Amino acid sequence: MSDLRHPSDETLLRLAYGSLGLGPSAVVGAHVAGCARCGGVVEDFERVAGALLELLPDADVPADGLARALAAIERDAPRPGEAPPAPPASRVEMPKGVALPQSVGDCDFSPWRTIAPGIRVSRARAHWARAFNVKLLSVQPGKRLLMHGHRGVEWTCVLAGAFHDGRARFAAGDLCEVDESVDHRPVVEPGEACVCLVAAEGSTRHHGMAGRLHQAIFGD
Ligand SMILES: [Zn+2]
């Protein structure tokens, strides 16, 4: 796909095959849930994966595979009388009219923290994943973020408002995927604050002293 407002085919393939990290899966999943085009691609990949599994020699699948899987599920299920595994999620105050995507609906969000004038961050924690590393970012209209590059891949799903990163405009529902080949400096459009869900794989390359601010946002 050449449209920059959707995840790459590689990311969709990893999402379908379950090899994408849980944090990036939640961010990319927030886009895919509302994008017929990407949803269709993921379904195609899942069909191919299913067909490939059927081609595997029987020897690769243990005869008691189903019984083992059921036993594992039973072990993980809460026993009667036990406290439910998931405590009620703490909610962050979202801007009026902006909802959290379902893919992070069960997460705990820390209260907003202002890390620079006009920039607020809330960290998401998932009780089911130790390394989740998803952030909610709210940037005031007209604000320019710092120029930064990446050693891995970073996914940003826009929930409200819009920004331009010099390559394309990203508005609500769009997903911006950048890898080590991209140095970008997003600028939020005038009008309303831009609220995004962000996850990264690998670390970010910072440019000069000002890059410390980006480090404060993303914590890597
Ligand atoms: Zn899409």
Image (spheres, rainbow, N blue to C red):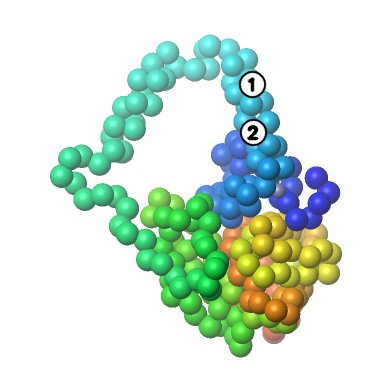
Q: Position of residue 115 (x, y in %)?
A: 56, 82
Q: Residue at x 53, y 11 (%)?
A: 58
Alpha-carbon distance for marks 1 and 2? 14 Å
> Residue 20 versus residue 121: which sits nearer the camera?
121
SS state under label 1: helix
User: In the image, is 161 to the left or to the right of 129?
Assistant: right
Q: Is residue 151 visible?
A: no
Q: Residue at x 49, y 68 (%)?
A: 123
Check disc 1 and give the amino acid type: Leu
Q: Position of residue 45 (x, y in %)?
A: 67, 32
Q: Position of residue 89 (x, y in %)?
A: 37, 61
Q: Which mark is residue 43?
A: 2
Above or below, 56 against 107 in this view is above
Above or below, 161 against 89 in this view is below
SS state under label 2: helix
Q: Residue at x 83, y 49 (%)?
A: 2
Quadrant of residue 218 in the image?
bottom right
Quadrant of residue 219 in the image?
bottom right
Q: Which mark is residue 52?
A: 1
User: In the image, is 48 to the left or to the right of 73?
Assistant: right
Residues packed near mark 1 inside 10 Å, few (<14), some (14 to 19) or many (20 plus): few
